Amino acid sequence: MIRRYVIVILVMTLSLPALVFSASVYETEAEFLSRAFNDSPPEPGILWLSGDRRATVRQILGHDYPALRVRYWCQGERSAWVLDEIGKELPITVGIIIEHTYISNLQVLTYRENRGGEVATPAFTDQFNDAELDINHKLDVTIDSITGATLSVQALTRLATMALFLNTESSCKDGL
């Protein structure tokens, strides 16, 4: 009888971290791309992060991006980017739609941290709408922080900045 209780407690203890640290998926990459391109997403393009481009991304993020290349989708003057950045301890996956040179939509696709999920709400993400880069590779809008989610706010701000910069480096800049 005691052995049975020990097994039950052991199983509950081992499964607890999975319950506590489960990811919140707000939108899949496929759903995001379908919404971005009216159910007809184009084939992805690839942008290599090397040379000056890599150095600028490092300056924006404060560290190297973990991939050597980034996929993006482009149709006319619209591009879509799916990027990851660490919040406090875990990656946040964000989808960003850019029209011409400004953000038309920023959506948290997957949030993995156990605190700070308020950054996924439209009340927060709508602050990025119409944001552009200034000449110093900074956003031209001020993003209000959220108490208890400072690192997540900073992560989304860095990703928005990175996407706008990469858009200027992509074939979308010419409307191709």
Image: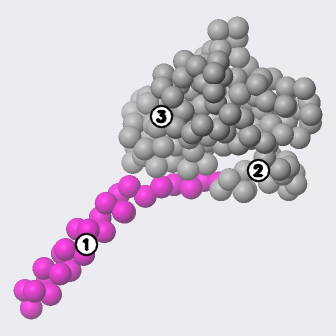
Inspect the image, locate mark 3, and give the three-letter code of the amino acid beneath it: Ser
Q: Label 1, on which residue?
A: 12
Outermost top residue: 135
Q: Which residue: 73% across, 56% down?
A: 31
Inspect the image, locate mark 1, and give the three-letter code of the amino acid beneath it: Met
How far apart marks 3 and 1 lie (CA) works out to 30 Å
Whether pointer 3 and pointer 1 mark residues with C-beta atoms closer than 8 Å, the reply is no
* Magenta span: 1-27
Whether pointer 2 and pointer 1 mark residues with C-beta atoms closer than 8 Å, the reply is no
Q: Which residue: 63% across, 21% down?
A: 51
Mark 3 closeness class: few <14, some 14–19, many ≥20 residues within 10 Å: many
| Between marks 3 and 2 in the image, the one whose residue lies nearer the viewer | 2
Q: Label 3, on which residue?
A: 152
What is the secondary structure assignment of the residue under circle 1?
helix
Give whichever of 73, 49 is nearer the camera: 49
Mark 3 vs mark 2: which is more N-terminal?
2
Q: Label 2, on which residue?
A: 33
Q: Write down the quadrant of residue 87 in the picture.
A: top left
Mark 3 vs mark 1: which is more N-terminal?
1
Residue 157, position as x, y percentages in the image: 57, 27
| Between marks 2 and 1 in the image, the one whose residue lies nearer the viewer | 2
Outermost bottom residue: 1
How far apart marks 2 and 1 lie (CA) works out to 38 Å
What is the secondary structure assignment of the residue under circle 3?
helix
Look at the image and tell me whether residue 93 can be seen. yes
